[in-house]
Amino acid sequence: MNDELVKLKKARDEFVAQWGALGTQWGINRTMAQIHALLITAPDPLSTDEVMEDLQISRGNAHTNLKELVAWGLIRTVLRKGERREFFEAEKDVWQMFIIIARERKRREIEPAVNILHKCAEESRGIKTPEGKAFHDQMRQLEEFVGFASKMADRVSSMKHGFAIQMATKLLG
């Protein structure tokens, strides 16, 4: 292998490892994030066997995580004429990845949190004790804030990439 290929492999392996570590911070497992990283850096679609070999994971682990990534919409199945195997390619547009991840996190994390806060606020409505009133007020404030943050995330993810960047630049500048 020539020096450039060795350097590229080293950098790619580092990215895959770090993306896997970051994935756990975003609410997905390490292997799922590593597969995603592998596919977003792959020049061509990869088969399950290629994913297994590159990441040194079992067929079951690869299959489960590939299916989950397809369900999220972060990767898609590619069929090749004359091939019986499935191949997978990632969404490579960074803005689209952000939108997909934001949508999935909202569905899996934010909406259940808002539902719990709403339920707790409703169940504590009308409690006359100072503790009950304080609890109710806290639940309402949290519900309001999380709902606001969710609506803001929806607005940002519905914007065109360039416009969102312009808005962020104005806010941060």
Image: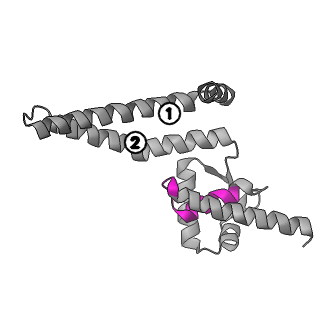
The residue range painted magenta reads 25-39
Q: Quadrant of residue 47?
A: bottom right
| Residue at screen point 34% across, 43% down | 113
Q: Secondary structure at mark 2?
A: helix
Does the magenta segment cover residue 38?
yes
Left or right position of 28 against 137? right
The reply to whether residue 84 is in sight is no
Judged left or right of residue 21, residue 91 is right
Q: Is residue 122 left or right of residue 3?
A: left
Question: For the N terminus, which image quadrant?
Answer: bottom right
Q: Quadrant of the C terminus?
A: top right
Q: Residue furthest right?
A: 2
Q: Look at the picture and state if 111 lies above or below 22.
A: above
Looking at the picture, the colour scheme in use is one colour
Q: Main secondary structure of the magenta part?
A: helix
Q: Is residue 12 above or below residue 166?
A: below
Give how far across and how far down residue 55 sits, in percent.
66, 70
Q: Amino acid at mark 2?
A: Ile
Residue beneath label 2, please? Answer: 110
